[in-house]
Image (cartoon, rainbow, N blue to C red):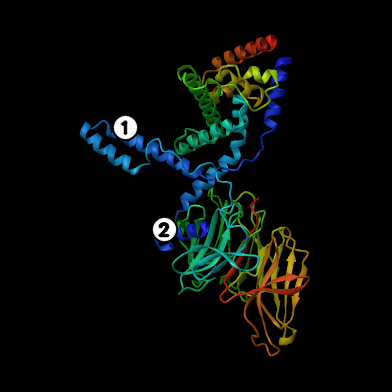
Amino acid sequence: MRDTLEQRLAAGLQRVGDDVPDDLDPPADLEHRVASVRNRRRGVARLAMLSAAAIVTVALATVVVAGRGPAPNRVDVDGPPEVADPLAAGTVMLDSRASFVVAVGADGGQIATLVNAGRGTIIDAQLTSDHRWLWYLSVAKTKKAGVECGEVVRADIRRGTSAIVARAVSFAISPDGSRLALAGGGDFAGGACVALTDVTVPARVVVTDLATEARSTWTDQGSPRVRAFNQMRWSNDGRTLVTRICDETCESLVAYAVPESLGSSMHFRIVDRSGFLGVRPSATFGPDGRLFVLERNVAARWKDHVQSVVVYDGVTSDRPTTLLRVGFGWDLKEVVPTEVGTFVVGRARDASGRVAGPTALYRVEHGTLVRVKTFGDFGVLTPVFSRP
Amino acid sequence: MELARRAERLEPVAAVVPLARLDVRAEALLDRLYRDHASGALRFAIMLTGDRPLSEDLVQEAFVRVAAKLHVLRDPSAFNAYLTRAVANLAKSHFRRQEVAKRHVRAVDASSLVVEPVDVATNDAVLVALRTLPMQQRAALVLRYYNDLSQDDIARVLDCPVGTVKSQLSRGLARLRKECRDA
C-alpha cells in the first residue's frame, strides 16, 4: 500500500513520462558512432595485449594500432543528428536508366543524378521511406533482365557510399528498410543466385528480416514453372509483395502475403491475369496505399485492344476501379502514382498501329492524358513519397 | 548542387566489397533496438535530470556505448537493463563533473554551470525534491515508482545488491518526505 507521498511521486513521474513519445527516430549517425566506439575499444584491447611485450615493441605497435583505428578523443564533425531530407526537394519519382538512377520532379525534369554505377544496367531502384537508403538492381548488359541474376546494391545517399548486398533476379526493400525480398533461383544463401534459365532449380522468393535474419520462402512447385519475374513492389504497410510472373504466359500479377513473423512459407494469390511482362513494373503502390496496375486486355482485333490503369485496394487486392482506359491508339508502358498525381509513360500509335509520336510522361487528369515531358530515353520509374 | 556532388561520390559497383549482408543486419538491428528502447531510456533520463536536451544526449551516448558492446554482453536480451544502467551512470558522471567544475573553476560564472533541473515539471515539489537526491537514490525511486520494478529487478538493472536497493529506496523516501515537509 502506497502512502500519499509515494502516490504523489508516482503521479508526478507518470506526467513526465507521458510527455515523451513512444517512438523515437534513431539519429542519422548512430551506426557511425557505434562503429567508432567499437573500433576504439578494439584499438585499446590490442594496445593492452601489446603492452606485455617490450617497451620498444609496444611503442611501435601503438603507432600501428593508432594508425588503424580512429583518432583518440575523436570529435564528431557531423554535427547533430540529421533532420534534413537527403533527397533533393521536389523529387517525386526515380528513373533508373542505363547505369544511372536519377531523381525526377513532377515536371519530368531531372533534379539530380543519385547513382552512377559505372557498369551494367540498372533495372530497378527503390528508396526507403526515410530517403536515406537507395537500393537498386544492376544487371550486366549481356544478361537478360527478369531471368538472369544481377547485383542488389544498397547506396547511402547521405554519405555517398554503396555496397553489394545480394544477387537476385528481382528484389524489393520494404519501406522501412527492415525486410529484403529476393526473387530468382536457388536459396540465396551466401549470396548465391541461380538464373531461371536453369530448369533444375525452382524459382524462389525469399523475404529476409535484416535484423533477425528470419526468412520466409515461396518455392515454385507449379507446372509450368516460373521462368521470369518482373520488378517486385512492397505495399506501404510492408505486408504484401506484388510482382508479375511468367509461367506459360506472362499474364499473372501475383500478391504474396508476407507473415508478420517470418519463418513460415509464403503463398501467393493472383490479382489479375491481364498483364504482360515488359521490362518495366506494371504494378506499384501509390501514396494512399492502393495498388495501381497497368492492364492490357489483348483482343483478337487490334482496334479492340484496350489498356487500363486499374486501382485495387492495397490490403485485399480487390475492389478494382478504373482510373484510365485508352484504346488501341496508345501504347502504355508503366504507371507511376505519386503524391502530386498519377503519371503514365507511353506513346501514341496511329490507326494502323504504328508509333505516331515519341515516348512521353503523361499525367492522368479526369480519365485523360496530359503530356508532361517527352523522354528521349526513359527507364524504370519508381514513385517517391514524402518522409513520414 | 550539393546532392549531385554527393551522388558523384558514390562508388562504382566494381569498387565496393561484395556481399555486405552482415553490415546491413547490424544496422537494421541498431535501428530496431533504438526504436524499442530509446523512448523508455529517455523517460528515465528526464526523470533523473529534469532536462530534456541533456537527457537526449545522455541516452544517445549510453545507447552508443551499450550497442558497441552488444556482441560481448553476457545477456544481449537484457539490452534495456544495460541501457538504463548506462544512463544512470552517465547522469551521475555528468553531475559530478559539473560539481567539480563549479568548485574549481572560479573564473567561470558558476550560474552558467547548470546543475539544477531547468526543464520539466519544476513546479512539482516532489519532483524538485527528487532531483536533490543522490543519483543512485533517484534511479532506484524512478525504477520503483515509475517502471514498477521489484527490488530484485532494480538491483539487476543498477548492478548492485538487493540490500543496497532497499536502503536507497528507504533513504530516498525519507529524504523526500523531509524535503517536502520543509518546503
Circle 2 residue? B16
Q: Nearer the viewer, residue A292 or B179?
A: B179
Q: On the rendered image, what quadrant is the N terminus of chain A found in?
A: top right
Residue A121: assigned label: none
- Residue A329 sits in quarter: bottom right
Q: Nearer the viewer, residue A93 or A108?
A: A108
Image vertical order of residue A15 relative to residue A89, above or below: above
Q: Mark 1: give few (<14), some (14-19) or many (20+) Cα within 10 Å.
A: few
Q: Position of residue B107 (x, y in %)?
A: 46, 20
Which chain is home to disc 1? A
Q: Position of residue A87 (x, y in %)?
A: 57, 56
Image vertical order of residue A253 relative to residue B95, above or below: below
Q: Position of residue A198 (x, y in %)?
A: 49, 71
Q: Nearer the viewer, residue A294 or A105?
A: A105
Mark 1 lies on a secondary structure that is helix
Point out the residue furthest to the bottom here: A352
Which chain is home to disc 2? B
- Residue at 54%, 54% (x, y): give it: A133
Q: Nearer the viewer, residue B52 or A58?
A: B52
- Residue B150 sits in quarter: top right
Circle 1 residue? A48
- Measure the alpha-carbon separation of dots 2 and 1: 33 Å
Q: Is residue A256 visible?
A: yes
Residue type at numbered disc 1: Ala
Residue type at numbered disc 2: Val
Q: Mark 2: give few (<14), some (14-19) or many (20+) Cα within 10 Å.
A: some
